[in-house]
Amino acid sequence: MGRLMGAIETDKELSVYESMAARFDVATKKLNLDEGLTKYLRTPNREIIVHIPVAMESGELDVFDGYRVQHSIARGPSKGGVRYAPNVTLDEIRGLAAEMTWKCAVVNIPFGGAKGGIVCDPEKLSQGELERITRRYTAEILDYIGPERDVPAPDMGTDEQTMAWIMDTYSMHVRHTVTASVTGKPFDLGGSRGRKEATGRGCMIVCDQALKRFGRQRDQTRVIVQGCGNVGSQAARLMHEAGYKIIGVSDIHGGVLNTRGLDVPALLEFVKENKTVQGFPGGEEINNMEILEQDCEVLLPAATESVITSKNADRIRARILVEGANSPTTPPADSILFDRGVFVIPDILANAGGVTVSYFEWVQDRQGYFWPEGMVNERLKHIQVAAFSDVVRYGEKHNVNNRIAAYMLAIDRVAFSIKLRGIYA
Ligand code: NAD
């Protein structure tokens, strides 16, 4: 199998945009895509920068920077999360928006890609401040979003409540309730059953497929999860319930390791009360980066980007890497993992369960008819199993690793739609 990963200088390896671009370049070359189309697919459709004035609890006025990048609308409205974090940059949002285009195409749902973000620290803001930031951000980008244009969803630092505020602000402006304007909403406001668990469930579905490939049983499989937010906690809970042995979980403050297997329900109860895994009595304390290097069969990064780099990839001991987070592995790390024989399930496949059930939510909102949870989970499984098999078969056929196969498959699908729409006319 080819070792092609994408050339990138090590000083740029932490840039999400550069990582995406390096992989994109390898995939488009392999696909023999023409120069004009390559340029078109590399460039975002639209980038919006807003500066949001917000009245703070202190009585003072502050101004926050916000972004929304719409990478592609070739296959349908653009779709993607909104993240609140102090280190958000336009470059990161641009890279993640493009990744959303490829992700929607890998699972073959009718969306393009987008991403948004606000530079702020949600842990230091009150609910009132968060609500005012969210409403003003929504008002600023209102002309460019909506069910037929661009549909936001939660990401790091945002949740169901954030989506409810966006939906309400959008609806107030257009003067009727538009539930399909966002996904990842509370169920009582038009959310979908199974959405909260969807990304974690999707990670488990593709991990199950990898296990099948290697003839391994769940109860012989030790799993380490980095991140205990929406994706990490749901993946840990569902995988524990399914019989996997979860031996380590971490968050931004630290981690906990128990080689005999963690009591995951007790851990999640502890996290609910203490807002961190640090200090959980059912295991030893471990640093949140060291936890990645522990002996296990499955490593599931579900926290943030660029955590597996040229600096630590040679110490990763997992056999299977399930990328719950977006862009957790840099291209130089890809090469090292490939040489070490790690089976990588790339982010645009592994964590696509979230956007897939978001698609179901958008469909249900537009129909005004809601599906039982069993149906949501069954349809999610159907899509992720098919996408896993498409990617692995594509990789075997074209002699490339799973990451490049996923990119090639996605780019091929988007390019085909563009050609069908007659862009050269
Ligand atoms: P979240 O905000 O709910 O949780 C993030 C978790 O990561 C928290 O536990 C935080 O403490 C931890 N964390 C942050 N930095 C860390 C670090 N350096 N080391 C260890 N832990 C760290 O976010 P989320 O929604 O669970 O998203 C996590 C990742 O998954 C992001 O990359 C996001 O883009 C991606 N993702 C999320 C969804 C979704 O449906 N929520 C879908 C697809 C991809």
Image (tube, rainbow, N blue to C red):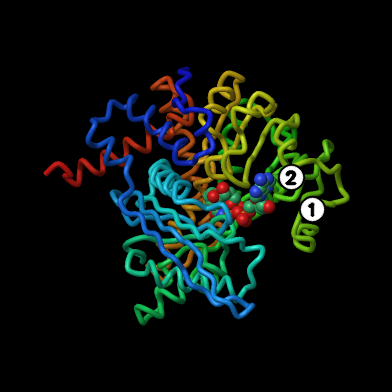
Residue occupying image coordinates x 86% and y 42%: 284
> Is mark 2 in CB contact (under 8 Å) with mark 1?
yes
What crowding class fits label 1: few (fewer than 14 Cα within 10 Å), some (14-19), or many (20 or more)? many
Residue 22: x %, y % from top left: 42, 31
Q: Quadrant of residue 143?
A: bottom left
Question: On residue 145, which mark appears?
Answer: none
Mark 2 is on which residue type? Val
In the image shown, does 58 or 2 lie closer to the viewer? 58
Question: On residue 267, which mark appears?
Answer: 1
Q: Is residue 381 visible?
A: yes
Circle nearer the N terminus (2, 1): 2
Tell me the distance, in whole angstroms, between the alpha carbons under discs 2 and 1: 9 Å
Placement of the C terminus among the 4 image quadrants: top left
Residue 165: x %, y % from top left: 51, 73
Which residue position holds label 2?
249
- Considering every residue shown, the one lying at the far left of the view is 425
In the image shown, does 293 or 105 lie closer to the viewer? 293
Q: Residue 270, relative to residue 28: is it above or below?
A: below
Mark 1 is on which residue type? Leu
In the image shown, does 177 or 150 lie closer to the viewer? 150
- Considering every residue shown, the one lying at the far front of the view is 60
Q: Residue 118, relative to residue 61: is it above or below?
A: above
Q: Is residue 230 visible?
A: no
Residue 389: x %, y % from top left: 47, 33
In the image shown, does 324 or 195 lie closer to the viewer? 324
Q: Residue 386, relative to residue 1: is it above or below?
A: below
